[in-house]
Amino acid sequence: MLRQYELVERVKRYDPDADEAMINRAYVFSVQKHGSQKRASGDPYFSHPIEVAGILTDFNLDDQTIVTALLHDTIEDTLVTYEEIESAFGKDVARMVDGVTKLSKIEAMSENERAAENLRKFLLAMSDDIRVLLVKLADRLHNMRTLHFIKNPDKRRRIARETMDIYAPLAERIGMYDFMREMQLLAFREIEPEAYASITRRLEQLKEGGHDKVDRIGAELQLLLAGKGMSVSVSGREKHPFSIWKKMQERHISFEQLTDVMAFRVITDSHEACYHALGIIHQTFKMVPGRFKDYISTPKRNGYQSLHTTVIHQDNARIEVQIRSRDMHNDAELGLAAHWAYKQKGDATDHHAAWLRDLVEILEQSQDADELLEHTRMAMYQDRIFAFSPKGELHQMPKGSTPVDFAYAVHTSLGNQTVGAKVNGRVVPLRTSLENGDQVEILKSEGQEPQPGWLTFAITGKARAAIRRYIRQKQRGEEIKLGEKLYEEIIGRFSPDLARELGDKALTAALKRLKLDDRASLMVAIATHRLLDSEVMEALMPGSTSAQGMEEAHPRQHEPVSIRGLTPGIAYHLGDCCHPVPGDRIVGVRRTGEPIEVHTIDCRSLEVEQDDDWIDLAWDGKSKGGTARLSVIVKNQPGALAAVANLFGATKANILNLQLVNREGPFHTDVIDLEVADAQHLNRILSALRAIDVVVQADRV
């Protein structure tokens, strides 16, 4: 554990003007407030914030960030208040400490909800001051280094998984690659202990059998470039176990089949020298096609710059080579932390802010924990491609992105109004996957709106969050309109003049009784059948005598949600034209202000509907029971109807309604509403009907 004077000396070494007194006060404050608290390792708790502060001194961070690290657990784990910290160390430090403080675990929440709520608060605090992220990453890194002291294996795995899914990608996104690699390594060791042990063992065997092949090839590269008059520094290493494991999983190959487990870094004196070194290496070694990437001319979104290539060495080993200037190397090692070093005082760059703005927008548009985690992981965790607008503006997106993803990357309003796209001057479908270097022109119309079908091919978190939000808002608007109509029907059945007689006070009181926020929420509850008519009237007029009998006198359809593709609670109606039953292929039709109509896929009424208004639906597999309508032509003779009724009884079908629509001549036509289990049951009944003598014809209507 760092002693007080050692920490101060570290900071003063790179920042002679640092507030030494403030750092000393924070060190003593942390030790006193954490007191006798212990960590799982048995060490004093205050050793943790001190180690976190020590980690951050390696990045030459300013004195406020170091003080925040010393205090980051005091609000959560001690009796210290925000006001105390603000009074003793200033508003900026207090705000950062509050941002880093982890939320108390709420037992009622699911694991995803807990993780999402932590992430939600974290992203908001991070958007206010990015130094919050730097402290949080150092905090998580030290916790991962001491993870093995936690006895509960489930807790260890949860922390490791959260680190792998959220914190390591965050570190990568801001260019702090050493943080990322160490967190991935420690998390991998916990999540896949057998794979970690196996790969580590094989790397050791490779090193022993190759007699320091990495050092030998590194020396060859150094000699090669120096011989061409270049001043360079070359270093090499075996790739990290997690990186190797990831490639094995992606390529479905064994460790023995991997050919590129060595990586080398060439540091040059200048930008131009990087390309000179690249030319020499490509002239000497055979380049592996498709493995060259120029991140100097097109930097990664976090600002990372380097040339990456893979070549085949003389002994047939593939080696990855990264070439960068010394300035590029310093930025790559420090990442975003370089822009909060004491000399620059927060001169953060646009490329670091852009991805953060995307995350905050996702935060605002995600409805629940699962969505937030899904979209955030998408935004942080994928390989990138580069695409250009017609004006030459560069946009980085995940590999596999489509024009819809590109449109939302430019601006949410452009995404919402997208009607088509041109890629490299050619009109393409919106589901087309973009390639590196594509020029993308988005065609838009003010009357356009996001389509649910876009969710089947949009892959970025930002695009998917925006599409879902728009659809939810539109759906809510339709539910409110439908609810208003049903509300008028409900009170109209009680009294035609009641709508005029009920004032704002009665509605306000009803909302309070029903625990609803506003009139719109009431209308949604009515439209989605969460409230019975009698419950609405009882809330409006407590003790109303008519309310108790309303449901029996005026039943409203309450169908259970048993259809996949519909939002739970959304109002829908089974078509009277085709009477779908479980087992039928079905489709939904959306009309403004009306319940969604469910039809069989071959229903004739669909011929006049627009495809854009259709929703793909399916029965949930557990649905049983429905009403089918049959048209049966029966011989006009005694006992014919009894024979039909007996058949229904034998096949366990229930007659709900029977109407004789034509009784002329030797036959009569009956329209029968029949309760059946599913489409298969109905087909057996039709086959049985057609087999008896008194039935001339039997068809489903």
Image (spheres, rainbow, N blue to C red):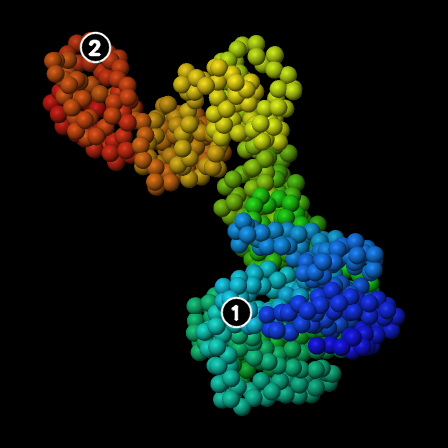
Q: Is residue 692 left or right of residue 155?
A: left
Q: x and y percent of residue 2 in the render?
A: 73, 77
Mark number, residue 10: none
Q: x and y percent of residue 605 in the render?
A: 39, 25
Residue 326 visible to the viewer: yes
Hey, which quadrant is residue 329 in on the image?
bottom right
Residue in front for this viewpoint, 585 or 78:
78
Disc 1 marks which amino acid? Lys
Determine the CA span between mark 1 and mark 2.
Answer: 82 Å
Quadrant in which the N terminus appears: bottom right
- The image shows residue 264, relative to residue 491, as above or below, that is below
Q: Upstream in the sequence, badge 1 or badge 2? A: 1
Label 2 residue SS: loop
Residue in front for this viewpoint, 393 or 161:
161
Q: Please report the residue visible at 61 percent of the width from the left and 21 percent of the height from the top.
A: 507
- The image shows residue 70, relative to residue 353, as above or below, that is below
In the current view of this chain or complex, which residue is farthest to the right?
A: 17
- The image shows residue 221, relative to residue 338, as above or below, that is below
Mark number, residue 663: 2
Disc 2 marks which amino acid? Arg
Q: x and y percent of residue 451 in the render?
A: 54, 38
Q: Please report the residue visible at 41 percent of the width from the left and 16 percent of the height from the top.
A: 553
Q: Is residue 69 left or right of residue 631?
A: right
Q: Is residue 481 left or right of residue 658?
A: right
The residue identified by callout 1 is 151
Task: Give the foreground label among 1 and 2.
Answer: 1
Q: x and y percent of residue 168 in the render?
A: 61, 64
